[in-house]
Amino acid sequence: MRKNIGTIWATIAAALCVVVPAHAQNFPAATEQRELIYCADKMTHEEREAYRASMRAARSAEEKAALRQAHQQEMQARPRQRGDEAPCEPLRLRSRGGRGQ
């Protein structure tokens, strides 16, 4: 009986060594932080995905900074064009609701 339990645990451990690394490839690295998109709540899903794709395609930090700057200017111009939306505020300036205030 003792040998059977040891064999079962060895089989489970071997299976985990194969399954876990293959499963982990589908998720971003834990150290990789996801960037908050300026005015994301005023964008459609397709616009957010296009922005993320352009950021992934940028090769240098300077290109990413230029994309961010162009995006912010575009999002700040939207309320002026439509005339009915409030401009975006950076997340750090928004009031926070909920507990602990």
Image (spheres, rainbow, N blue to C red):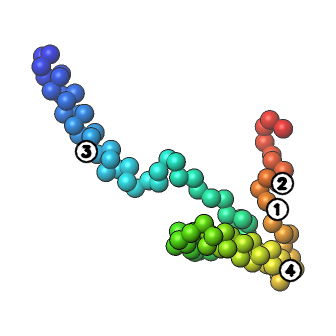
Q: Quadrant of the N terminus?
A: top left
Q: Are marks 1 and 4 in contact (CB under 8 Å)?
A: no
- Label 2: how many residues lie within 10 Å, few (<14), some (14-19) or many (20+)? few
Q: Are marks 3 and 4 in contact (CB under 8 Å)?
A: no
Q: How far from the left and from the top, in percent, is residue 91? A: 77, 56
Q: Amino acid at mark 4?
A: Arg
Residue found 78% across the figure and 37% down from its top: 99
Numbered disc 4: secondary structure: helix
Q: Which residue is mark 3?
A: 18
Establish if 8 lies above or below 40. Answer: above
Q: Disc 1 and disc 2: Cα gap in Å?
A: 6 Å
Q: Amino acid at mark 1?
A: Glu
Q: Disc 3 and disc 2: Cα gap in Å?
A: 46 Å
- Of the numbered discs 2 and 4, the one sitting upstream in the chain is 4
Numbered disc 3: secondary structure: helix
Horizontal side, residue 58 vs residue 4: left or right: right
Establish if 28 lies above or below 2. Answer: below
